[in-house]
Amino acid sequence: MRVVPMEYGKLLSASTTSSLWNPRRKLLKAHNFKFRIEAQTHRTSQVGIAKPTNLTHLDIQGFDWPSPTDEIPFWKKQFPSWDVNSELPSQQTKDSKLMDIVHVTAEMAPIAKVGGLGDVVTGLARACLSRGHTVHIMLPFYECIQKHQINNLTLITTYNSYHDGNWIPTNAYHGQVSGIPVIFIEPSNQFFKGHQVYGGSYNELEAYLFFSRACLEWMQVTGTQPDIIHVHEWQVGALPILYWDMYHYLSLKKPRIVLTIHNMEHYGECRQEQLSMCGLDGSLYATFDKAVDDRTVGHNPERLSLLKGGIVYSNAVVTVSPTYLKETLCSGWLSSTLLRNHDKYFGIVNGIDTTMWNPSTDVFLPSNFDVKNSEGKKLCKYYVQRGLGLTSGDHLTETTLKVPLVICITRLVAQKGLHLITHAIKQVEELGGQMIILGKASDHRVEREFEDLADSLNQGPSIRILLMYSEELSHLLYAAADIVLVPSMYEPCGLAQIIGMRYGAVPVVRKTGGLADTVFDIDDQSNHEMANGFVFEGIDEASLNFALDRAFACYRNKPEEWNCIVKKVMKMDNSWNITAGKYIEIYESVAAS
Ligand code: ADP
């Protein structure tokens, strides 16, 4: 663990920010999961250290295997160092025109990650850094951020930023996370306090309105003028409006704005008087061509959509896959706005950071592996099976390893196809496989439903439902899995299938959004070259069964073909190397000359 920098240590004792110091609180909360285990021995082994990888030569008695009765679950053991990721992805050539890019975002992996947004911001920023660009991320200084994951955290600016008639004293800190310079914005009010990124006991919309303005205010007071301000999602949808209608008339002239929409489910519904809290006259934006939420037209009062305002006021708008772009032009409340702005609307499929997601170096794995030497994957599978009690006894048998292991790692929300996830549990059991779900629900009813399922199934021989968020466990599961299931109702891009493939798990997905752009059916003879998984189209159980059945049949009956698919998916280049270039083209096309 890294030592907290002196500057920050001093600040803690000298200011009221001491309540920020709560490392591990988030993890402890995550520990409250529904897989009941009895306390037994306490093991302190380190995982992630190179271990023998050939199972046939492996003395499994000598290996420190986890058990469901371990007091400390295997994914919480002491891992070498979290910050393996400060090394940037290797990039041979630098771009010819170098730009200054600032991302403004509500999430960033790994310190403030809830879903794919955090991965994408970090991955894209690192890819652009490695191409030679200057990149910063601006992030709210959430109370839940674990400070030991930030390098050289230093207070750099104290300033005031406007909110609802008052100027709020605000601190800006600078630190390095995963090799990226980050500016943390910390208001002195209650905003961003709490144990998690979202769901604190403050008004989230107002907090993000404050944050949007506070980022521009910081640029103004420090004279920072990047070429590109890249905003993400509805949370900072007001920033493009604030920029063009306020700060551009003050001192900020150079920046141009790019908005990425990662998911159109949330429009950023906003009352006119709430928008006024950030210093704009909210009533001026309640028009069809600006930010009125089209669903509320004709109602009294008409409301605003921050996402719509962001689309209208940004110089370019990107969404995270070409198919999702088409889907969003055809349906949804924003389709007419997007159609009107079609010329500046682009679909770029997300990449993954292949340095951060790398089975050959991943510090969370008991054994590393790659496409040439995949024996370590077997060890990871057995390790997870042992740790979760999915083996019969302590002896490694061929049968244990041969059981197809399906994983599903997801936020448990309707979008992700909850009815198909619960159906998959039954189907996998019936097919004689094993399934592990790692998921977190924000809705209490969904949480209860999955808790009930966990209570009835987690003691059995084949299903484990782990209701928590754990980055470490997600790495272990991707490495252990034979199949990664993503049965989403809609999916703007989806990262689980891309990460799964990198770790040798074959995807079974529903054909929608970015899943349709990244997974192609093995049995589609017309697209043999791209074929890399099992795809279904319907939202019914029979459609899912059809894909799962074919995957199981291939795994069991055609092991050589299966191994070829595993090798193929591991070799695919889904890194940011390719897709970051498309973002750079967009940055260049909008940057002020
Ligand atoms: P979304 O952004 O809609 O949540 P994505 O597939 O784009 O979906 O990204 C999800 C990211 O969050 C992936 O990196 C996935 O591994 C991770 N993730 C989702 N749920 C969990 C969880 N319960 N624990 C750990 N990681 C999770």
Image: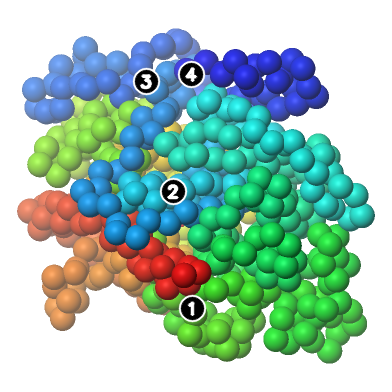
Where 70 falls versus 190 (above or below)?
A: above
What whole-number distance in Å separates the C-alpha atoms at marks 3 and 2?
30 Å
Compare marks 4 and 3 and give the one earlier in the sequence: 4
Residue kind at label 4, given as amino acid type = Arg
- Residue type, label 1: Tyr
Indicate which disc, 4 or 1, sits on the residue closer to the N terminus.
4
The x and y percentages for residue 80 are 37, 20
| Label 1 beta carbon less than 8 Å to ligand 1 | no
The answer to whether residue 455 shows anywhere in this view is: no
Number of numbered discs present? 4
Say the numbered circle drawn on residue 2: 4
Query: Quadrant of residue 261 in the image?
Result: bottom right
Q: Viewed as shown, does residue 398 lie left or right of 272?
A: left
Query: Is disc 4 in contact with disc 2, using a CB cutoff of under 8 Å?
Result: no
The residue identified by callout 3 is 80
Q: Which label belongs to residue 345?
A: 1
